[in-house]
Image (cartoon, helix red, strand yellow):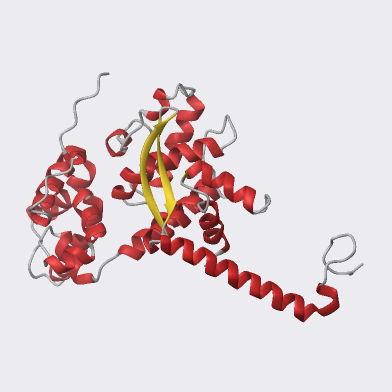
């Protein structure tokens, strides 16, 4: 699963969203690192819809524009949890591999590299 | 790309809906120009997809863009187009099904169920039927040319005009395209009503 797809699944975890809401949530969750444009957003969304991880949740008119809502399916939730677990395990192994360097420093910054 | 027409010169027929901008009070010309730009790039997606998700994509793109932008921009546009092409590639059925549907011939119920999305696209757009038809006619035309060059069978004026006009006409004349599309739809989906997209539109007031 690509990072963008994973972030989209996470963005839908706390309820249905429309396209613009998704872009905002992704930015929030990634702490501003990932900001999806319309092209990448809908490309990823389309793949997730095709894979059955995200479902179309109907159209509503908001601010005079047709907004389509998306929601996470059960499979999508399962995939997001599996990916989170995988990343957590990867991070744990990474920390073990780094040994002392991987431990958070006294100021909360990871590693003691000057 | 089929959407690369001058704004207002024929794009209106292909555009699925553009009344959203006026309804939201966003009538400034830059927002309109931006929407047109998004819709041109969005032509990379199949029409069926645009009908369902297009308006949401346009609204999202408008909100994500900084105000005053008149174009989507090359990078975002290419990202959008890549998504559309990837979708078309994923849904593409085997050659046999493409050739049959390209000529508006029915395929088995099993093929129809397996490749429904693609077959709906083919029924909706003459441009998608063109490749299969070209794949059939181009070798014929080349054989004719070769024969002519060898001093044999001469390609007739009728064959040289009727075939290209018959192939390209439905693509270039919207009303003709819809007519052929309606017939194709009735053949490919005999049990389903023709979608309103293919009906004759009311003439817009000038």
Find residue A16 and report its horizontal and vertical position in percent: 46, 46
Relative to A107, B24 lies left or right? left
Q: Nearer the viewer, residue B145 or A86?
A: A86
Say how many tags the image has: 0
Q: In the image, what residue occupies the spot 43% across and 51% down?
A: A71
Q: Quadrant of residue B83?
A: bottom left
Q: Nearer the viewer, residue A64 or B198?
A: A64
Relative to A95, B73 lies left or right? left
Q: As displayed, is residue B73 above or below residue B79? A: above
Residue situated furthest top in the rendering: B206
Q: Is residue B52 visible?
A: yes
Find residue B33 and report its horizontal and vertical position in percent: 47, 31
Q: As displayed, is residue B103 above or below residue B20? A: below
Residue situated furthest right in the rendering: A114
Q: Nearer the viewer, residue B25 or B99?
A: B25
Q: Quadrant of residue B5?
A: top left
Find residue B122 and report its horizontal and vertical position in percent: 22, 55
Q: In the image, what residue occupies the spot 54% across and 65% down?
A: A81
Relative to B180, A101 lies left or right? right
Find residue B136 and report its horizontal and vertical position in percent: 17, 66
Relative to A96, B122 lies left or right? left
For the C terminus of chain B, give its image quadrant: top left
């Amino acid at each position: 699963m690509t990072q963008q797809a994973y972030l989209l699944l996470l963005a839908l975890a706390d309820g249905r969203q429309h396209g613009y809401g998704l872009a905002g949530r992704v930015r929030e969750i990634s702490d501003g690192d990932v900001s999806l444009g319309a092209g990448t957003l809908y490309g990823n969304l389309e793949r997730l819809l095709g894979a059955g991880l995200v479902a179309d949740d109907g159209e509503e008119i908001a601010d005079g524009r047709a907004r389509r809502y998306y929601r996470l399916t059960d499979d999508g939730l399962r995939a997001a949890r599996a990916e989170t677990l995988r990343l957590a395990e990867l991070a744990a192994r990474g920390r073990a591999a780094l040994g002392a360097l991987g431990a958070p420093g006294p100021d909360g910054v990871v590693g003691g590299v000057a | 790309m089929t959407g690369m027409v001058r704004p207002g010169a024929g794009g209106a027929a292909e555009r699925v809906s553009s009344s959203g901008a006026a309804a939201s009070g966003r009538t400034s010309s830059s927002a309109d120009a931006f929407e047109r730009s998004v819709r041109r790039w969005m032509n990379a997606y199949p029409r069926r997809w645009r009908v369902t998700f297009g308006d949401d994509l346009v609204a999202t793109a408008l909100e994500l863009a900084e105000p005053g932008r008149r174009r989507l921009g090359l990078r975002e546009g290419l990202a959008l187009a890549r998504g559309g092409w990837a979708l078309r590639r994923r849904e593409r059925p085997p050659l046999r099904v493409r050739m049959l549907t390209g000529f508006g011939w029915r395929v088995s119920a099993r093929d129809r169920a397996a490749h429904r999305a693609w077959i709906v696209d083919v029924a909706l757009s003459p441009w998608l039927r063109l490749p299969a038809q070209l794949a059939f006619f181009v070798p014929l035309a080349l054989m004719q040319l070769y024969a002519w060059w060898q001093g044999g069978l001469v390609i007739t004026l009728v064959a040289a005009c009727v075939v290209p006009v018959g192939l390209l006409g439905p693509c270039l004349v919207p009303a003709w395209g819809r007519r052929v599309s309606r017939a194709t739809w009735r053949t490919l989906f005999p049990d389903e009503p023709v979608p309103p997209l293919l009906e004759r539109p009311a003439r817009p007031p000038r």
